[in-house]
Image (spheres, rainbow, N blue to C red):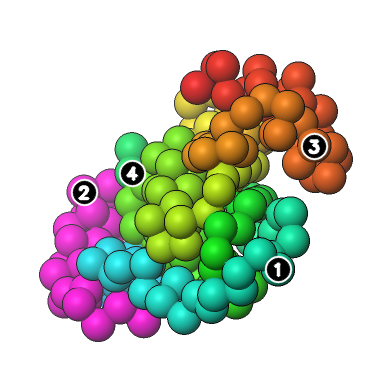
């Protein structure tokens, strides 16, 4: 849990918010809520101030024996939209074409978790993941596909509970549409659908 989070200040703010909506923060039902929210926020925003590049520091040189592609798919994703502080969640798929180094497979979900555990927007999150991998591994190419459902879309406003947002971030040789099409086929999604989602951003 994030020890840099000021739980007392969060709890005080939650008490004020409960009062502002007309509830009694001292009622038996809500008396513990401010501190529960403070603990939850410490978890949700544990990535603030943490450098995700540290998880790539143990990358190992492998020379030419890297294979053609590394693809880690269906990584659970949870973040908080910075516009309404409502959660968005879904899956991340990360591919990279190695240069001279590869990293342990658990490092990629850790990078994603760290970058997601801060106020975010999905488009920026994908770009940050791609840039972190490019900077940390110097691969020939990176492709990051994020699919997520957003609380600010499903639970308020237009209330489209089944809407899913897909974003794509790429670097190097994996920015080429032909290269991407092969990866999209492995993911089981049509390149046309992904291209449309990216164009709509």
Q: Secondary structure at mark 3?
A: helix
User: Which residue is located at x 70 percent, y 59 percent?
Assistant: 70
Q: Label 4: how many residues lie within 10 Å, few (<14), some (14-19) or many (20+)? A: few
Q: CA distance from mark 2 to mark 3?
A: 53 Å
* Labels 1, 4: front one: 1
**In terms of image quadrants, where is residue 127?**
top left
Q: Label 3: how many residues lie within 10 Å, few (<14), some (14-19) or many (20+)? A: few
Q: Secondary structure at mark 1?
A: loop
Q: Is residue 79 visible?
A: no
User: Dot 2 corresponds to which residue?
Assistant: 20
Asked whether disc 2 touches disc 3, contact meaning CB atoms under 8 Å apart, the reply is: no
Q: Label 1: how many residues lie within 10 Å, few (<14), some (14-19) or many (20+)? A: few
* Labels 2, 3: front one: 3
**In terms of image quadrants, where is residue 162?**
top right
Q: Residue 44 placed where, x, y %?
A: 40, 65
Residue stretch rendered in magenta on the structure = 1-25
User: Dot 1 corresponds to which residue?
Assistant: 65
Q: CA distance from mark 1 to mark 2?
A: 61 Å
Residue 23 colored in magenta in the image: yes
The quadrant in which the N terminus is found is: bottom left
* Labels 1, 2: front one: 1
Q: Residue 149 placed where, x, y %?
A: 61, 41
Q: Is residue 67 visible?
A: yes
Question: Counting residues from the N terminus, which is met first, the one under dot 2 or under dot 4?
Answer: 2
User: Dot 4 corresponds to which residue?
Assistant: 82
């Amino acid at each position: 849990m994030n020890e840099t989070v000021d739980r007392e200040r969060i709890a005080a703010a939650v008490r004020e918010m409960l009062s502002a909506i007309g509830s009694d923060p001292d009622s038996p039902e809500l008396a513990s809520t401010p501190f529960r929210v403070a603990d939850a926020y410490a978890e949700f925003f544990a990535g603030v101030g943490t450098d995700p590049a540290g998880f790539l520091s143990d990358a190992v040189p492998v020379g030419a024996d890297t294979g053609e592609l590394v693809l880690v798919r269906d990584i659970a994703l949870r973040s908080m939209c910075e516009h309404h502080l409502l959660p968005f969640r879904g899956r991340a798929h990360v591919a990279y074409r190695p240069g001279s180094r590869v990293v342990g497979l658990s490092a990629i979900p850790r990078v994603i978790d760290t970058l997601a555990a801060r106020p975010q927007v999905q488009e920026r999150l994908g770009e940050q993941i791609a840039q972190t991998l490019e900077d940390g591994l110097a691969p020939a190419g990176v492709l990051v596909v994020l699919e997520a459902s957003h609380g600010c879309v499903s639970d308020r406003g237009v209330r489209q509970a089944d809407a899913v947002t897909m974003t794509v971030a790429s670097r190097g040789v994996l920015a080429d549409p032909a290269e991407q099409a092969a990866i999209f086929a492995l993911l089981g999604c049509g390149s046309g659908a992904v291209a449309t989602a990216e164009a709509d951003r």
